[in-house]
Image (spheres, rainbow, N blue to C red):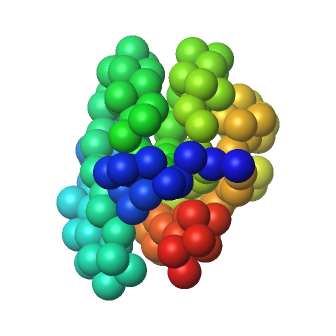
Amino acid sequence: MWRTGQSGMASRIDIINGPNLNLLGQREPEIYGTETLSGIEAACRALTDRMGLQMTFSQSNHEGALVDRIQAARGAAAGIIINPAAYTHTSVAILDALSAFDGPVIEVHLSNIHRREAFRHHSYISARADAVIAGCGAQGYELALSRMARLLGKA
């Protein structure tokens, strides 16, 4: 069972974004849409406020920084929603960091990675994820928050 009863972490969800997501709205809008990362953050913040949850929202283009962020969530966050972007397909380090986290993990992808190039069909992160949401665009984050709230008994 997830550690949701500890003080200060029962209601915080950490949303972690990987490389190139800072370019959303500019980079390949035909694949990733026109929504910006700041727009996604605002929508997530509005939803968590309505749900009575807290959240952090971060992005890095650096694998080690993402690992550090995941490790910092240990004992501080009830759950992690992660869009590891290209590191989905390459990073055992991110998988290992997520495996050391005791709460639920939801993997999000804006595009349907299974309709794209063959190398994108494999996700290291899925081996740890409690749910995977792909191909729903920016709405995938809202779906992930709704699912996370249910997993945490907050919905």
Count of numbered labels shown in the rendering: 0
Residue 42 against residue 112 in the figure, above or below? below
Q: Position of residue 152 (x, y in %)?
A: 57, 64
Q: At 43% from the left edge and 35% from the top edge, which residue is drawn?
A: 75
Where residue 126 appears, x then y in whole percent?
Answer: 72, 40
Quadrant of the image for the C terminus? bottom right
The answer to whether one can see residue 13 in this image is: no
Q: Is residue 118 toward the left or the right of residue 33 in the image?
A: right
Residue 2 position, x and y percent, is 63, 48
Residue 125 x %, y %: 66, 35
Residue at horizontal 39%, vertical 15%?
Answer: 64
Is 84 left, or right, of 122 in this rendering?
A: left
Residue at 55%, 23% (x, y): give it. Answer: 97
Q: Residue furthest bottom?
A: 50
Q: Nearer the viewer, residue 88 or 129?
A: 129
Is residue 104 placed above or below 154 in the rendered structure? above
Residue in front for this viewpoint, 73 or 68: 73
Is 10 in front, or is 42?
Answer: 10
Identify which residue, 25 or 73, lies in the foreground: 73
Relative to 95, residue 24 above or below: below
Answer whether residue 102 is visible to the viewer in this image.
yes
- Classify residue 132 as left or right of residue 74: right
* Picture quadrant of residue 90: top right
